[in-house]
Amino acid sequence: MKISQGNLTTLDTCPRLFQHTVLEQLAVPQRGEEWEKMQLGSQFHQLMQQRSQQLPIAAIAATDPDLKRWLEAVEAQSADLFPNADEAWTDSEHIRTMDWRGHTIVGVYDYVVLRSDSAQILDWKTYGKPVDSRRLAQSWQSRLYPFLLAKSSDYSPDTIEMRYWFFQGGDDDQPQMLRFQSSAAAIAETTAALTQRLMTLDLWLKAYELIGESFPQTEIRQTCATCSFAVRCDRVKRSLGESEGMQLETAWDSIEEIPLTQLP
Ligand code: SF4
């Protein structure tokens, strides 16, 4: 089956949630505010795709103050983001796939800048920079995207960099960027983690398909407190009662953070 970074994240969050949303395709309702944010984010991604293709976007950007501000920040870095064709090859909504242990690993990159000696994978986030950068570094997106590129190109791992742009919440309303450099060790860790997840997934899939056994539910009941399937999973009462006193993982930042205004 097709496996994306989102699928892997869901699988880690709760295998039963993977069953409901990926296998059974049950819809997760979006609240009004979330839906509006998603729409704006989607619009911004489309505009960035048009911008990378040299298509006009000013008129559309002018319809929303957030879009306008974000695109102005992008334009301030246009030399780095949109190099000449003889300097780098760029692509929006760049898709990479790779067969791995009977599955197809899929990555849809917001934007790539591929130079002869280095590769940047860029991701646009139309929300604020997370407090815990380490969690982002360990996310499946941060691990899988460099892994896919390293495995499907001639780039050595230490020439691949993941760059997240966060367009909300920075000083003076300026976007901020987090950069994660890949390495041979990181790719090896991702290879091992991915192999382990897919082996486990295969076991669960087999039991689900052959004897109708449901995927396991998460043991972290706090997760259920905000899950749309809490009633279906009979996790409503316990999730409310047991979520009290639970603490989220301690945050700490160890990843290089570079405000865009300080970029060369
Ligand atoms: S309610 Fe809990 S167990 Fe059920 S899918 Fe959601 S997170 Fe998983």
Image (spheres, rainbow, N blue to C red):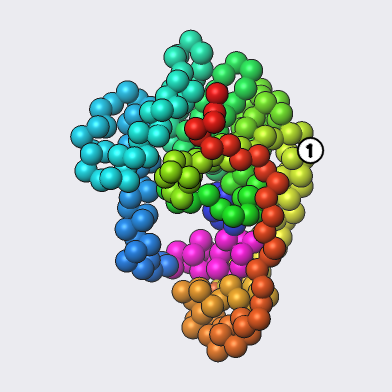
Q: Is residue 85 above or below residue 107?
A: above
Q: Which of the pair 169/125 is nearer the observer?
A: 169
Q: In this view, does 165 lie to the left or right of 242?
A: left
Q: In the image, what residue type sits under mark 1? A: Ala
Q: Which of the pair 133/1 is nearer the observer?
A: 133
Q: Is residue 1 something one can see in this rendering?
A: no
Q: Is residue 50 left or right of residue 116?
A: left
Q: Residue at 38% across / 28% down in the picture? A: 75
Q: Residue at 45% across / 14% down in the picture? A: 85
Magenta extent: 10-26
Where in the figure is residue 200, as x and y percent of width and height? 71, 60
Q: Is residue 72 left or right of residue 57?
A: right
Find ligand 1 in the image and state its quadrant: bottom right
Residue beneath disc 1:
185
Q: Residue at 49% across / 64% down in the picture? A: 21
The residue carrying mark 1 has its beta carbon less than 8 Å from ligand 1? no
Q: Which of the pair 113/106 is nearer the observer?
A: 113
Where in the figure is residue 175, as x and y percent of width and height? 46, 41
Q: In this view, does 184 lie above or below 138?
A: above
Q: Total marks drawn?
A: 1
Mark 1 crowdedness (10 Å alpha carbons): few <14, some 14-19, many ≥20: few
Q: Which of the pair 216/204 is nearer the observer?
A: 216
Where in the figure is residue 8, as x and y percent of width and height? 61, 55
Where in the figure is residue 141, as x and y percent of width and height? 59, 46
Q: Residue at 51% across / 17% down in the picture? A: 88
Quarter of image, res 91? top left
Q: Main secondary structure of the magenta part?
A: helix
